[in-house]
Image (cartoon, rainbow, N blue to C red):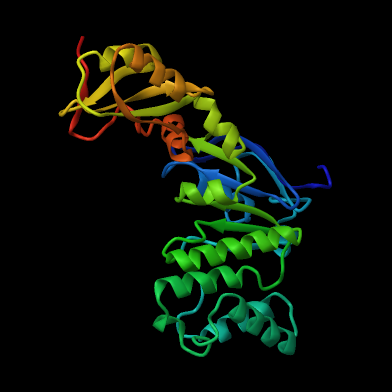
Amino acid sequence: MNNETMIEVESLTKHFGATVALAGVSFSVPRGAILGLLGPNGAGKTTALRILTTLTMPDGGRARVAGFDVVHDAAAVRRNIGVAAQDATLDETLTGRQNLVMVARLSGLSRDRARLRASELLEQFELVEAADRVLKEYSGGMRRRLDVGASLVARPPVLFFDEPTTGLDPTSRARVWEIIRGLVAEGATVLLTTQYLDEADELADRIVVVNHGLVIADGTAAELKTRTGEARLEVALSEAHPEAAAALAPFVLGDVQVSHDGQRLRGRVRSEDGLATTVVRALDRAEVTVDDVIVHQASLDDVFFALTDGRRDADDFSPEMEVARP
């Protein structure tokens, strides 16, 4: 394995009875990078995460984390990773501080160092005021912050975050993002799964999309957005015009959608420079008066739904829109 590759997955397979969870998944993550692992429920991402964190044995293929094989060197892998699972795994009967001290002691820190590290994390995650309250009195967002903090106790070089900001308010979410970026700036390697596509767009250096146990896309957010090659065109008219839809038709992929009042038109288009200007000129030639033309580039949400058959489509407009008929 390359010294700079901290997570390497090659042709991983896993079956649960007749169910194929992983059907030959491969990807790698270099040191100091964030990989976003995305996919619909049941796609295989949680299974992959459990294998990488030594909680599940693969049926085939291999995986190495921080240079260690997840099957043959499982104990070494565990010494080099931090994990924040979807569900909080701390003790509800202990205080926040006691939970962090316990994790630190289990990680091999001395009593004094464990207390110091707990205080550092409570400060970092803005939990000082709640430090000596038992965990069962914490809100969902506070529990999640403490759980993420616990994964950082031993300052591991590789971190696995399974939906790290689920249940957090926007301020807490932004704080966790800031902390993750800081960890990566210090050299940590992060693999995260998330249900928030904007989170992957914001944080991940690269994104791997899995579906039905297979990798169906791998690239930067920008690369995945351009893969569809599509954007969404929206046109607002000063007043309805019978030739507007026909004037837009040469630029639109599929149907032109028109609002009931005839003043708004929408459709899927190929993403290309100068498209808005070209559309305005075409409408002008048809003597259609335009108020506004907007070209919405594909978002990561659009790409995700397109790749995973989620059926989000630029033609799936609101009820007041209908297909223009010739």
Please tell me which residue is depicted at 62% across the width and 65% down the height of the picture.
Answer: 179
Towards the viewer: 47 or 255:
255
* Extreme-top residue of the structure: 326
Towards the viewer: 105 or 177:
177
Residue 80 is situated, as x and y percent measured from the top left of the image, at 73, 61
Task: Tell me if residue 304 can be seen.
Answer: yes
Q: Tell me where residue 151 sits by quadrant.
A: bottom right
Q: Quadrant of the C terminus?
A: top left
Residue 36 is situated, as x and y percent measured from the top left of the image, at 58, 46
Q: Quadrant of the N terminus?
A: top right
Please tell me which residue is depicted at 47% across the width and 67% down the height of the picture.
Answer: 171
Image label count: 0
For residue 136, side relative to residue 194 (left or right): left
Task: Tell me if residue 88 can be seen.
Answer: no
Residue 293 is situated, as x and y percent measured from the top left of the image, at 37, 29
Residue 71 is situated, as x and y percent measured from the top left of the image, at 69, 50
For residue 36, side relative to residue 134 (left or right): right
